[in-house]
Image (tube, grey):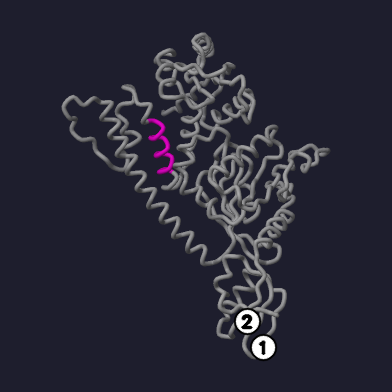
């Protein structure tokens, strides 16, 4: 009878720059790393960290700390040494030599990539994860990274005959290089398809709100609460990777589109951001951002800063934003959620689980969508009933009058609708 292989045991190692200013303390960052390890199916058996002026050029931590970690890992029967920072290829090689064959060396980036690989379910998501994994691995190839058909042989590409004097390592690099080129070409096709899909979606001329936030802040649960969607939501980091878009009706009767996106995290590897560019374009194309914050998290200020840093990297930090302070059902009764954050943005306490604050959040979103509307006075011929309906459904009508020449409407329209009405605008004296 087949049995499940026992979970690997991980020993965590952190590094703290003496004069650095990280978003999280080293202990809090290691706590987050432990959550990541748990999501990946590892059992954490111990941890340590070292403070230094700069990482050791060969082994990241100093030689004495390397010996200490090796001893502790042996005593705790660990299988994996898990570093809380991205290791350089040299660090990786030297640490593997120092720890020997019985201990794997994995860094934070490799762990996140592994979690992404477990949670990617769509064709696009799997392509993005594989590309990020291969671009991470290629500078770290050693002779132990041979025979990579398990990762690269599923959808094509055969290894050519080895040339004179060509090593297995060179062969692996060439094979991975070909696979990377293939993945990039496929993702270009995905990006083009997604762009066409967005163009079709824009023809509905609904305003788009992209849900952003730190991983596990409750974005998918909130999408389900606001729209009745059935998106996977779980109490783990990076539970969902693939974007989901649903319609939601605002209190005033207009509809908007809500799009859930991949969660952010501090020290989010740049190759992940690059690989998920097609998915993150959903944020870039949005009209408004809905930033979901875990109001119960002890490091909520650092999480907000991490999300804002990533939004700045994506060059979307200029977009209007509404903040949702989520999980208020888990706060002590004497805590005022508004006291937890300092922000000039509209901020609404909510529980995505119980629905408390739902209507208040929708009103806050609606107020921002209305602020993006432009005043408009139009006289529409009776034969343009389609535009009359569009104004009523997508805009705000403050006054309407049926005249001999057509329907006169006074109100406000989303900026993206203005071109449809340009030929019928009326200038009132």
- Residue 128: name its quadrant: top left
Does label 1 or label 2 sit earlier along the sequence? 2
Helix or strand or loop: what does disc 1 sit on?
Answer: loop
228 versus 392 height, above or below: above
Q: Looking at the picture, tell me which residue is in the foreground, 227 or 134.
A: 134
Residue at image point 57% right, 43% down: 312
In the image, residue 135 lies in the stretch drawn in magenta: yes
Q: Main secondary structure of the magenta part?
A: helix
| Left or right placement of residue 274 versus residue 217 in this view | left
The answer to whether one can see residue 83 in this image is yes
Which residue is rendered at x = 62% and y = 69% of the image? 394
Residue span colored magenta: 126-137
Question: Which of these two is toward me, 126 or 363?
Answer: 363
The quadrant of the rendering that contains the C terminus is: bottom right
From the viewer's side, name the closer residue of 125 and 221: 125
The residue sitting at 57% across, 75% down in the picture is: 422
State which quarter of the image contains the N terminus.
top left
Within 10 Å of the Cα at label 2, are there few (<14), some (14-19), or many (20+) other Cα atoms? many
Residue 391: image location, x then y, percent: 62, 73
Q: Which residue is mark 2?
A: 379
Q: Which residue is mark 1?
A: 403
Please give the label number shown on residue 103: none
């Amino acid at each position: 009878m087949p049995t499940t292989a026992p979970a690997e045991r991980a020993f965590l190692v952190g590094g703290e720059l003496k004069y650095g200013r990280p978003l999280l303390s080293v202990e809090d960052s290691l706590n987050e790393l432990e959550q990541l390890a748990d999501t990946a199916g590892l059992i954490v058996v111990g941890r340590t960290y070292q403070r230094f002026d700069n990482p050791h050029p060969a082994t990241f931590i100093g030689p004495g700390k390397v010996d200490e970690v090796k001893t502790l890992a042996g005593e705790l029967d660990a299988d994996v040494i898990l570093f809380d920072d991205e290791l350089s290829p040299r660090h990786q090689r030297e640490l593997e030599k120092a720890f020997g064959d019985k201990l794997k060396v994995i860094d934070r980036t490799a762990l996140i990539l592994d979690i992404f690989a477990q949670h990617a379910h769509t064709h696009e998501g799997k392509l993005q994860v594989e590309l990020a994994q291969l671009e991470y691995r290629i500078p770290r190839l050693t002779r132990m990274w041979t025979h990579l058909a398990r990762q690269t042989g599923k959808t094509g590409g055969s290894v050519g005959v080895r040339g004179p004097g060509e090593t297995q390592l060179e062969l692996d690099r060439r094979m991975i290089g070909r696979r990377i080129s293939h993945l990039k070409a496929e993702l270009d096709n995905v990006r083009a398809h997604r762009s066409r899909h967005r163009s079709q979606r824009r023809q509905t001329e609904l305003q788009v709100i992209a849900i952003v936030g730190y991983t596990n802040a409750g974005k998918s649960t909130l999408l389900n609460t606001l729209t009745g969607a059935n998106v996977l939501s779980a109490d783990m980091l990076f539970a969902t990777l693939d974007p989901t878009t649903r319609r939601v009706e605002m209190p005033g009767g207009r509809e908007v589109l809500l799009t859930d996106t991949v969660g952010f995290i501090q020290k989010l590897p740049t190759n992940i951001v690059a690989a998920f560019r097609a998915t993150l374009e959903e944020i870039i194309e949005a009209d408004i951002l809905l930033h979901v914050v875990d109001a119960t998290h002890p490091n909520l200020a650092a999480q907000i800063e991490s999300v804002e840093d990533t939004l700045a990297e994506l060059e979307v930090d200029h977009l209007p934003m509404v903040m949702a302070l989520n999980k208020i059902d888990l706060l002590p009764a004497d805590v005022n959620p508004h006291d937890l954050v300092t922000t000039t943005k509209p901020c609404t306490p909510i529980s995505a689980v119980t629905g408390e604050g739902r209507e208040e959040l929708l009103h806050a979103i609606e107020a921002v969508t209305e602020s993006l509307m432009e005043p408009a006075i139009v006289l529409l011929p009776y034969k343009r009933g389609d535009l009359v309906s569009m104004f009523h459904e997508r805009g705000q009508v403050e006054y309407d009058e049926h005249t001999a020449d057509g329907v006169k409407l006074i109100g406000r329209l989303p900026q993206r609708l203005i071109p449809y009405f340009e030929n019928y605008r009326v200038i009132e004296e």
